[in-house]
Image: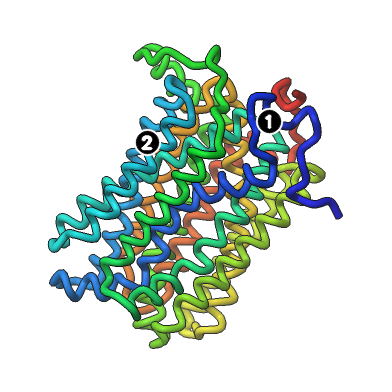
């Protein structure tokens, strides 16, 4: 079986001016993307403590710490990619990481829940600079090869949620909750130093664009009017909303439903491992089977599993083991579907990869945050709201996919010219 981190063939390798190897590039790209997830997953064990120490009356409002961050990520993606098309990928990535360090430190110093939410929005705005990583990948790869690289970065990226809650819980055992944010700042500083030393500029100077209202508006029209781009972007948005709801509710579910709050980090990690295994599988088979076959099949299984979860929860049969098993399979299907949906949405936008990634990222992240918040506010001491929300997201996503594919699932994809170079 081929090594998924083998150097790419000559036609797929980084341009001559890059010095970073294929394997190191995949790991660094994953680390850049992981700065976003780490700032959510590691703080989940701290939410009850934050709610208590900052005097928040409604425990469900603790989810706002997650929602505020994700809203910031969504808003931030409107401009980071656009700026990277004008000034290059490298300075924008580094600038975003510096702001990330500052915002995380500010979160650690606040004594007001309202102020914490405000700093979390800025934290998310800074973390959104990681969207430029997708543009870097698109600079170097296209088509199924791009999907393979994205899958590999997703595998490594998912190592973060497998260990982040445990890291957060360990920090809480040794220090106040504020040190969680200090660790976020330190992590981002390390990644910034690595990128500064090893990541070259991947956008050739002749391809840098002048930022005019006309150009940005034209790119926005392309993103919104291209059937593949907009439909798969919306499909990712609703699926991401279900994921955000899960992340926001999981601590409450383990505490209030199963009365096993201390088990949350390990069970959360188990679900993330299934996501990682699914993404690794995708990286090995996507170039042979194609993005559509894999993602469409995964979406149909996702709908079937979440429907089963709704029935289990509605009939009062939910137990800890049923939740973990069903959620793990759901997350694996999510991984197989969304990683390919994202690649398919971005693939038609090679000429405007930075702006395209920004606009798509805004739609998926901001839309997902709103959907996740809407699902999360319905938490009632059972897993039923989460299961219903996931099923609804799967059905809406299927409608988007059907529209993108003109009613035909699993249809073969005819590569564009850009996929051949």
Give how far across and how far down residue 66 sits, in percent: 33, 59
Q: At 39% across and 87% down in the image, what residue appears?
A: 259
Report how far apart the C-alphas of labels 1 and 2 lie in the structure: 23 Å
- The residue identified by callout 1 is 14
- The image quadrant that residue 402 belongs to is top right
Q: How is the image coloured?
A: rainbow
- The residue identified by callout 2 is 95
Give how far across and how far down residue 271 sits, in percent: 56, 69
Taking the image as shown, residue 53 lies to the left or right of residue 246, namely left
| Pick the front one: 235 or 388 | 235
- The image quadrant that residue 178 belongs to is bottom left
| Pick the front one: 374 or 55 | 55
Relative vertical location of residue 67 with respect to residue 254 in this rendering, above or below: above
Q: At 15% across and 55% down in the image, what residue appears?
A: 115
Relative vertical location of residue 223 with respect to residue 29 in this rendering, above or below: above
Secondary structure under tag 1 reads loop
Are there few (<14), some (14-19), or many (20+) residues within 10 Å of tag 2? some
State the residue lying farthest toward the bottom: 259
Taking the image as shown, residue 47 lies to the left or right of residue 4, namely left
């Amino acid at each position: 079986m081929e090594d998924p981190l083998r150097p790419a063939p000559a036609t797929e390798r980084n341009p001559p001016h890059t010095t970073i190897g294929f394997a190191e590039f995949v790991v660094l790209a994953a680390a850049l993307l992981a700065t976003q997830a780490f700032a959510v997953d590691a703080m989940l064990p701290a939410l009850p403590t934050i709610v208590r120490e900052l005097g928040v009356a409604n425990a469900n409002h603790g989810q706002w710490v997650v929602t505020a961050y994700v809203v910031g990520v969504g808003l931030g993606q409107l401009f980071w990619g656009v700026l990277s098309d004008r000034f290059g990928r490298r300075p924008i990535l580094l600038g975003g990481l510096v702001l990330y360090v500052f915002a995380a430190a500010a979160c650690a110093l606040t004594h007001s829940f309202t102020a914490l939410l405000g700093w979390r929005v800025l934290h998310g705005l800074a973390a959104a600079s990681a969207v430029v990583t997708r543009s870097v990948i698109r600079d170097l790869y296209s088509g199924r090869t791009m999907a393979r690289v994205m899958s590999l970065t997703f595998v490594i990226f998912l190592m973060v949620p497998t260990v982040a809650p445990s890291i957060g819980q360990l920090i809480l055992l040794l220090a106040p909750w504020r040190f969680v944010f200090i660790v976020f700042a330190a992590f981002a500083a390390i990644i910034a130093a690595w990128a500064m030393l090893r990541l070259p500029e991947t956008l050739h100077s002749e391809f840098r664009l002048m930022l005019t209202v006309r150009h940005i508006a034209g790119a926005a029209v392309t993103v919104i009017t291209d059937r593949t781009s907009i439909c798969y972007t919306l499909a990712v948005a609703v699926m991401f909303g279900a994921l955000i709801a899960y992340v926001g509710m999981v601590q409450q579910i383990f505490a209030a439903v199963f009365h096993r709050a201390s088990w949350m980090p390990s069970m959360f990690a188990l679900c993330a491992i299934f996501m990682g295994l699914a993404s690794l599988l995708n990286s090995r088979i996507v170039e042979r089977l194609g993005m559509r076959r894999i993602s469409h099949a995964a979406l149909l299984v996702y709908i079937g599993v979440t429907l089963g979860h709704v029935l289990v929860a509605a009939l009062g049969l939910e137990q800890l083991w049923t939740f973990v098993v069903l959620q793990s399979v759901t997350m694996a299907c999510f991984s197989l579907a969304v990683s390919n949906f994202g690649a398919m949405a971005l693939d038609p936008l090679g000429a405007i990869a930075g702006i395209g990634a920004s606009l798509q990222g805004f739609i998926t992240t901001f839309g997902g945050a709103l959907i996740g918040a809407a699902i999360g506010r319905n938490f009632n001491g059972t897993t039923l709201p989460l299961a219903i929300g996931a099923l609804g997201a799967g059905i809406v996503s299927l409608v988007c996919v059907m529209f993108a594919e003109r009613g035909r699932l699993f249809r073969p994809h005819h590569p564009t010219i850009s996929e051949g170079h």
